[in-house]
Image (spheres, grey):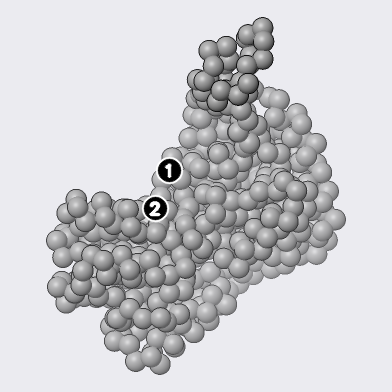
Amino acid sequence: MIKGKNYINGEFIDGNIYFDKINPSDLEIIGKFPKSDKLLVEEVVKIAKNSQKLWKNISKVKRGEYFDNLCQRISRRKDEIAHLISKETGKNLNESYAEVIEALHMAQFTFGKSRMPSGEIIPSELSERDSYVIRKPKGVVAVISPWNFPFAIGGFWCAAPSLLEGNTVVFKPSELTPMTGQLIAELYHEAGFPNGVFNLIHGDGETGKYLVESDINHICFTGSVEVGKEIRKVCAESRDKTCSCEMGSKSAVIVFEDADLDLAVQACLNSAFKLSGQRCVSAGRLIVQRSILEQFKEKFIEQAKKVYIGEPFGDGCNDCTIAIGPVISLEQKERINKYVDMIKKEQNDILILGDELNGCFISPTVFQSEWKDKSYLKEEIFGPVVAIVPFDLIDDAIRIYNDTDYGLAVGICTNNYRIMRKMRDECDAGMIYFNLGSIGAESSLPFGGVKMSGYGHGSAAATFDAVVHQVAVTYNHAEIVTFPQGLK
């Protein structure tokens, strides 16, 4: 049993009211964590504001040195971190190790950015002037992170760029993954970051609401569309508060008739079932050209039946294709099953029907459907439920893919470069992968989407721009005042 603490101004502090953390694999209580109230949130934000005045004046190179310290600590503790992620989320241990490496890459990338050019020199229209752009931190950044990548996204994709650019951070991890959140705070503490620069507050959605409405300057949020909309409303009504939100998805893999079919099946399996379909970019739709539909289905179903479902540390995956653990909670399992019930009632062609399993475990459901206006085809299910949707022509594939409110990621399997170019230009997506699935983000690239999937690319490499103001500076070297554009 872990008794969690908030991390405020360089100290780990007990709370007053606590909530339980449940292990999704066995439904046992494995920790109790503080539920932070409004007064505490406001106090932490004040501390972060005061600390930012000093932190922003430290050389960017020196700020980067802290990340070198942080990288060394992540490397030394990667086994411990991966096991904790799996225990808390139910994520297969192999995927948890990959998440730790992803976070490490982001910390290394941040360290590297500290010694790279910052800002731009822009030629002026007038020879008597010099112009350039500098980057100023926005102030205090609130990081509200999800439970599916609790280590990489909140602790490093969002917090690391914010800190390097001279902001301070108030971090609220998901109430479903507070243990990983606390471990992140320990790592920042051990790396020697000054007091008040990185702060952690535990709590539920109410705590997150207090943080969003507090006197912070920017919000990095990853989570549901509903919460993201509320955050954007708060920012729109404020004087100078901004946000970058990565929200929902109904990602897909599109398979054309010229594709390498074995490669396409691998791409689809991983995109649909890794992390039990609970990745932001999980492919809930496999859009397959009708001319190869039967061949694809035969290969895909054969492999999908080999998905291993079990405890995340288990070694029962001998002849399996993918090993998956439980979904995050009983509430999430119930939500997934409601969609499966709708699919059955609509008399779709069900190719694999998920079995009834104990606890938070759930097995894959695969069905075939023509494209139609149904919630289970257009909404994010966030579980191992996948639709195979046939199409005839390239324009049909584009129409089907775009016909949702989301636009996060798409994998496209084809060897035809003309198809590649048209799909690249016509698909509404923030991330496009050719001859890959819809998963495979790298820290040095932006992570975000379009439409209801995102606003501001608030994760990974693009965060560096989201958390600064770019300020234009001009010097006049003439002895008179002159103007551009011919103004007299």
Dot 2 amino acid type: Met
Residue 139: give x, y in percent of width and height: 71, 39
- Residue 82: x and y in percent read 49, 52
Q: Residues within 10 Å of mark 2 (few under 14, many from 20)?
A: many
Rendered residue at 39%/53% (across/down): 431
Q: Which mark is residue 445?
A: 1
Q: Earlier in the sequence, mark 1 or mark 2?
A: 2
Residue 431 circle label: 2
CA neighbours of label 1 inside 10 A, class few (<14), some (14 to 19), many (20+): few
Decide: is 107 above or below 121.
below
Residue 129 shown left or right of residue 418 in the figure:
right
User: Residue 105, labelled with which disc?
Assistant: none
Say if 197 sits above or below 400 in the image. above
Which of 387 and 136 lies nearest the eye of the viewer?
136
- Residue 50 vertical position relative to residue 150 in the rendered view, above or below: above
Q: Residue at x 31, y 65 (%)?
A: 398
User: Residue 53: x, y in percent?
Assistant: 76, 31
